[in-house]
Amino acid sequence: MTEKRIEQIWTLFKESPGILRSSAMRKLGICSKDLKELENEGLITRLKDGYYAWSSMLDDLSDFYIATATIPDATIYGISAAAQYNLTTVIPDAVHIKVPNKGKIPQAPLYPPIQIIREKMPAFSLGRICGNSEPPIYDRERTVCDCIKHKSEIGVDIVLEILKNYMNGPRDLQKLYSYADIMRIRTAIHPYVEALI
């Protein structure tokens, strides 16, 4: 493969940024032989079937970005979202994501460690934020509700830390209670909020 060809392919990865699907690359004239050659030379890294990253860019890609770029409709939730919003000092041991409950559970990439939860529509869409350049994530209020809903897995002390930090920062209690009603956890959330107001 010529240097010019490598430069063209590198430009595609740079514009993506960093991760491309093999199906998209085929449409741009990059065949499986090219991918194998680039992988053998260490220029690209296979993340999972059909997804590749430009190897030198991997260090600059967040675990959240890799998770959401390689799993369709993935959304950062729970303790991972709380860490992203600086609501907790806990560093999650995996990227926690939700996907819509349809079909098979999607294959996770080889790295980073990912915990996938499925959720039915329309609950999946509640509080979901999809920015142009940021990985999809649930908003602060949905994050607090998710953490309270899963307090037995996360731990009561961590949930209290998340709630205290939420109450001390930007907050929308009307939205929080609205989500709590929809998620049927109002009776679980109310005592915590009342104690912190």
Image (tube, rainbow, N blue to C red):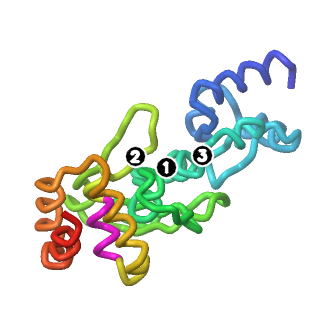
Q: Which residue is mark 1?
A: 68
Q: How would you rate the neighbour count of disc 1 (Cα within 10 Å): few for under 14, some for 14-19, many for 20 or more? A: many
Q: Pointers 1 and 2 in contact (CB under 8 A)?
A: yes
- Residue lying at 15% horizontally and 56% vertically, measured from the top left: 173
Looking at numbered disc 1 in the image, what kind of residue is underneath it? Thr
Q: Which residues are magenta?
A: 143-150
Is 46 left, or right, of 43 in this rendering? left
Q: Position of residue 133 (x, y in %)?
A: 46, 32
Q: Is residue 132 above or below residue 87?
A: above
Residue bearing the label numbered 3: 62
Instruction: Give the Cα separation between the discs numbered 2 and 3.
Output: 13 Å
Q: Dividing the picture into quarters, in which one does residue 161 lie?
A: bottom left
- Please check the rendered image and state whether residue 145 is part of the magenta-colored stretch, yes or no: yes
- One can see residue 150 in this view: yes
* Mark sitting earlier along the chain (2/3): 3
Prevailing secondary structure of the magenta residues: helix
Amino acid type indicated by mark 3? Ser
Compare residues 42 and 142 and report the one nearer the observer.
142
The span from disc 1 to disc 2 (Cα, nearest Å) is 7 Å
Which quadrant of the figure has residue 146? bottom left
Q: Is residue 179 magenta?
A: no
Name the residue: 61% across, 58% down: 109
- Which element type, helix, strand or loop, lies under badge 3? loop
Position of residue 35 in the picture relative to residue 49 (left or right): right
Dot 1 falls on a residue whose secondary structure is helix
Residue at the limit of the structure toward the bottom, as seen here = 152
- Residue at (57%, 39%) from the top-left corner? 23
Q: Secondary structure at mark 2?
A: loop
Residue wearing tag 2: 136
Going from N to C along the chain, the mark reached first, 1 or 2, is 1
